[in-house]
Image (spheres, rainbow, N blue to C red):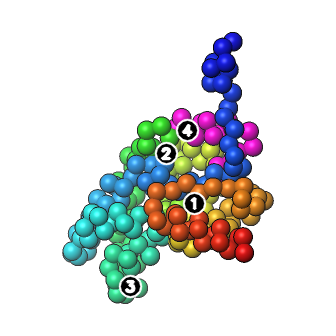
């Protein structure tokens, strides 16, 4: 068999034993939906909607933190009302699942074949939201563990990463965080800094 064909059949090795993915904007092409649902939630309450750019900037944060970033000085009651409106809009929109980015299915399949490499998720989504998308796509089994902002703490706090590593019994140097925003980078940076002190 030609060498090239052999290489295609063999799973590529992965230098990390745990690859931790962010969800929205990294695996799933969901930013436009998040923007539309935030605009709809603001409109439902009769509030001025933030700009699409401002909404895109908060993707990755936990919901309470995202609402506070969009409406600085917002009270707890208003924040919770807005969060509930956004969640309602998102649940409705999510009846039709958002798509994965092109190449994600193939890339994940290759990583899953790599010896001793496992996958996990660290996301600002709620547990309910992540479980819903796992159900829609039947992809929950890709991941050995997952953590959401409402289970732990919002990015950039590194608690999600600490918990995922502890759940997998791995040291920090065995894992890599894959994300698309500054919150992912900052979370990974803070976590590495504390882990190696
Ligand atoms: Mg993201």
Compute the Cα span from label 2 to label 4: 19 Å
On the rendered structure, is 3 left or right of 179?
Answer: right
Q: What label does residue 77 carry, if any?
A: 3
Looking at the image, how many numbered discs can be counted on the residues? Answer: 4
Magenta segment range? 105-122
**Which mark sits nearer the N-terminus, 1 or 3?**
3
Residue 105 is left or right of residue 164, and the answer is left
Q: CA distance from mark 1 to mark 4?
A: 18 Å
**Residue 79's spot in the image, x, y percent?**
38, 80
Judged from the image, the secondary structure of the residue bearing numbered disc 2 is helix
What residue is shown with label 1? 122
Q: Secondary structure at mark 4?
A: helix
The spot of residue 19 in percent (x, y) is 63, 51
Residue holding disc 2: 136
The residues bearing labels 3 and 4 have C-alpha atoms spaced at a distance of: 42 Å
Q: Quadrant of residue 195?
A: bottom right
Instruction: Residue at 24%, 70% (x, y): give it.
Output: 49
Residue in front for this viewpoint, 22 or 87: 22
- Residue 107 is marked as 4
Of the numbered discs 2 and 1, the one sitting upstream in the chain is 1
For residue 92, say whether it is visible.
no
Instruction: Examine the rendered structure and indicate whether residue 185 appears above or below residue 136.
Output: below
Left/right placement of residue 188 relative to residue 1 reads: left
- The residue carrying pointer 3 sits among few (fewer than 14), some (14 to 19) or many (20 or more) residues within 10 Å by Cα, namely few
* Residue 152 numbered tag: none
Would you say the residues marked 3 and 2 are in contact, meaning their CB atoms lie under 8 Å apart?
Answer: no
Q: CA distance from mark 1 to mark 3?
A: 27 Å
Question: 47 or 159, which is in the foreground?
Answer: 159
Nearer to us of marks 2 and 1 is 1
Tell which tag, 1 or 3, sits nearer the viewer. Answer: 1
Ligand 1 lies under 8 Å from the Cβ of mark 2: no
């Amino acid at each position: 068999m030609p060498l090239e064909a052999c290489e295609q059949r063999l799973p590529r090795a992965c230098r990390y034993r745990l690859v931790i993915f962010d969800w929205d904007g990294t695996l799933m092409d969901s930013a436009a939906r998040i923007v539309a649902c935030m605009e709809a939630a603001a409109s439902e309450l009769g509030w001025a909607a933030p700009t699409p750019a401002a909404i895109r900037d908060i993707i990755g944060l936990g919901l309470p933190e995202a609402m506070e970033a969009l409406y600085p000085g917002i009270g707890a009651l208003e924040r919770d009302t807005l969060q509930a409106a956004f969640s309602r809009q998102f649940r409705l929109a999510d009846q039709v699942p958002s798509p994965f980015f092109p190449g994600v299915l193939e890339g994940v399949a290759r990583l899953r074949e790599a010896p001793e490499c496992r996958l996990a998720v660290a996301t600002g989504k709620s547990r309910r939201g992540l479980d819903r998308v796992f159900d829609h796509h039947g992809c929950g089994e890709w991941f050995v563990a997952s953590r959401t902002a409402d289970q732990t703490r919002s990015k950039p706090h590194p608690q999600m990463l600490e918990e995922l590593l502890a759940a997998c019994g791995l040291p920090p140097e065995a894992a890599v965080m894959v994300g698309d925003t500054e919150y992912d980078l900052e979370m990974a940076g803070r976590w590495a800094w504390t882990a190696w002190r």
